[in-house]
Image (tube, helix red, strand yellow):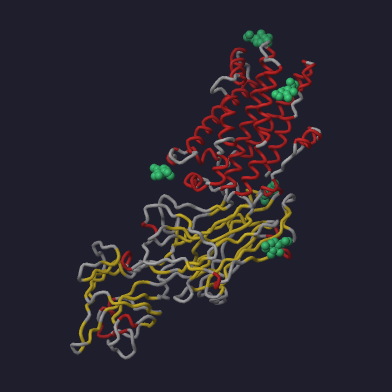
Amino acid sequence: MKCGIIFFSALLWAFQNPIEAKINYNYMDEREMLHLGETFKEIERLENVVKHRHAAAFALGSDDYINGSISGVNDMMEIFNKIRWISRHYDRLRRFEMDKYENITQISLAEAQVSKKEGENLQAMEEIHRKLFGRDDLIGLLARGNQQFQIYTCKTPQSPQQFLYRFYLDYVLLELKVHALVEWSWMLLRKFGRGGSIDEENESREAYKRRTSGTLSKIKEFMSQTDRSVWRCDPRNHKLGVTYEEVTSLLQGYIENEVDLNTDGSCKRGCGYYTSSKNEGCFNNKFCSEQPKCPGGVYDCRFVESDMEICQADKNSNRRYEFIQYKSGLVHGRKKSCGTWLNRARSWNRWIFMECSYCVCLCDDQSPKSDRYFNLRPMIADVDNNRVVTGLRFVKRNRIFHLQIQEGELLPLGVINETTIQWKPVDAYTITDNDVKESVDFHMLTYEKRSIDLGELKVENNSVVTGLRFQVVGTHLQMQAQFSRVDFEKGMLIEPKSTSFWVSGAGDQQRERLPLKEVDVPTESHVPSIPFPNENQYIEFTNTGFYQDAAQSTVPYIDIRDVISDPVVPLSGIGIYYKGRDGYGGFLAPKILTYDFTPHVQLPTWESLNSRKVEDNIVN
Ligand SMILES: *[C@@H]1O[C@H](CO)[C@@H](O)[C@H](O)[C@H]1NC(C)=O
Ligand SMILES: *[C@@H]1O[C@H](CO)[C@@H](O)[C@H](O)[C@H]1NC(C)=O
Ligand SMILES: *[C@@H]1O[C@H](CO)[C@@H](O)[C@H](O)[C@H]1NC(C)=O
Ligand SMILES: *[C@@H]1O[C@H](CO)[C@@H](O)[C@H](O)[C@H]1NC(C)=O
Ligand SMILES: *[C@@H]1O[C@H](CO)[C@@H](O)[C@H](O)[C@H]1NC(C)=O
């Protein structure tokens, strides 16, 4: 938005070009010099604002991501090439000011600028404008069909709205440069007696005016409709502890003989009977003595085959088993050579007619191996020092998941003071600390309570996100967001202690479960995840499929990469969503909604432009 205001003073200069003053040639020269000098300054200022940011050009221009068959992409590439070309001319013009150059060199640059020939700058500008705002409506395509550009925009941590704005700034800079080039050129050519006719000079200015006049209202309209969320696409390579973390051993495939699932040591009911039971012993030290017993509930047992080989996982692994191979050849999990322990488990008969079968069940393994905790303590930005939330990421600390906030000092017009940005340290407590209580400080996932609500929390009045917390609503874990009122112009939180308020989503009754059944681990997918629609949904942490993974992992995984925007901005919302692919367990991840600064992008009317004195507008 700062850029918006700078942009206006530059445009004002450009449009306030008093052509009538041409009567006095010498006087005009001075005015023109002044005008040009100011245009240079504005271009410099705008360039400083957009420098160090991820340029839209950067996002689109990286070769390894170009796919020409997506509509618009080739046009975008062409535009960026022209931007580079015109910028080179502009840089040459600026060098002429510093050093002495041959007259002929300067004249040839000037003539290229005012030429109306095909492919020269004036034509190129007309072309770019037509593509963006004319019939081709590239800007509209960017605004509406952003999914098509997703793989490109993935490269920049920007919401589609920011991307559009940033792209528009590139365009504005370009128009200003062309304007400066043309004005400078006419001036130079006149000096050498090669100036154009009044009509000719007028025409190039009028073209500029015609092109730029409608663009701001158009971009503003598009921006107000454009998605403002920032989320992370999958990384090229998933890496445990770096790009993702796991809830571990929440529900895990577990082999147990029926005889050990009841208190009377009988085998008369069959595996299917045991939907919710627990381990009750270890008859005859058979397979049960070869594995750690399940310390929690044993659920959803079934009979598969009576004879199997079980490859147990390494003691340090989160898995119990690498794979299970049945006599028939059926394999649960990924078969490989078993470098650890291979055990045989074979059902046996008791009194000839009663078979004591090995059942395949799920173990709710509440042991120290199981990381299944979520922090319930609030995470609040330092509002007393005017800090607001600017980013989110999940971290796992001492087996507990925290949703960590990035905070930064709010300055006027939605700018964040970059030197103050930091990830607020999480409370690094452990679940066994003396003063730490379950359901107060942390939530423990169990077979009965393992759902998490999905969706966005946003507020459209003048408020920004200043904190968050998890609460247990019904049996669901639910994120809630704290908002505080803000004076956008002054860049101040308004009495955050008294005006802050919490926003939460719908209760668990009104939500639908996003089903996740018999899936593989998400890191095995060869195609990148896509976000699922998530309003009024929830998802249950659950085991992977028996067939795919011997039900050894807990899904969804949790994406732990930073979710921030560039430039860093205040947020008008945050959310948790699920992304994945059919057949795979997917990832849970946070998203942020950038503050909607469209209302603050100012829109002067032509009348007000003409009635105000130029000087008043340059002060900014
Ligand atoms: C390029 O995009 C088209 C259309 O979306 C798609 O069908 C094709 O697979 C893509 N090619 C590559 C190499 O990504
Ligand atoms: C360049 O043009 C200026 C102004 O017309 C003239 O004074 C100067 O002598 C020229 N220089 C050369 C090297 O022609
Ligand atoms: C410049 O051209 C526009 C339209 O092309 C015309 O309305 C305007 O009067 C012209 N100005 C001058 C100073 O010739
Ligand atoms: C940004 O923060 C730094 C460090 O706190 C401070 O010194 C500086 O004055 C701030 N900048 C602005 C523009 O407030
Ligand atoms: C802003 O909106 C939220 C939720 O929509 C509401 O709770 C809050 O009272 C509103 N604040 C003001 C000052 O309107």
Instruction: Name which quarter of the figure residue 334 lies in.
Output: bottom left
Q: Name the quadrant of the C terminus.
A: top right
From the viewer's perspective, tell me whether residue 150 is left or right of residue 34.
left
Residue 500 in sight from this viewpoint: no
Residue 163 in sight from this viewpoint: yes
Q: Position of residue 159 (x, y in %)?
A: 57, 49
Instruction: Name which quarter of the figure residue 315 lies in.
Output: bottom left
Q: How many marks?
A: 0
In the depicted view, which residue is nearer to us: 451 or 248?
451
Q: Residue at x 74, y 25 (%)?
A: 34
Q: Position of residue 502 (x, y in %)?
A: 65, 66
Q: Name the quadrant of the N terminus.
A: top right
Q: Seen from this angle, which residue lies furthest left? A: 352
Q: Position of residue 46 (x, y in %)?
A: 65, 36
Q: Quadrant of ligand 3?
A: top right
Instruction: Name which quarter of the figure residue 126 lies in.
Output: top right
In the depicted view, which residue is nearer to us: 293 or 159?
159
From the viewer's perspective, tell me whether residue 181 is left or right of residue 256.
right
Q: Residue at x 63, y 29 (%)?
A: 177
Q: Residue at x 64, y 59 (%)?
A: 465
Residue 125 higher or lower than 24, as above or below: below
Residue 505 higher or lower than 289, as above or below: above
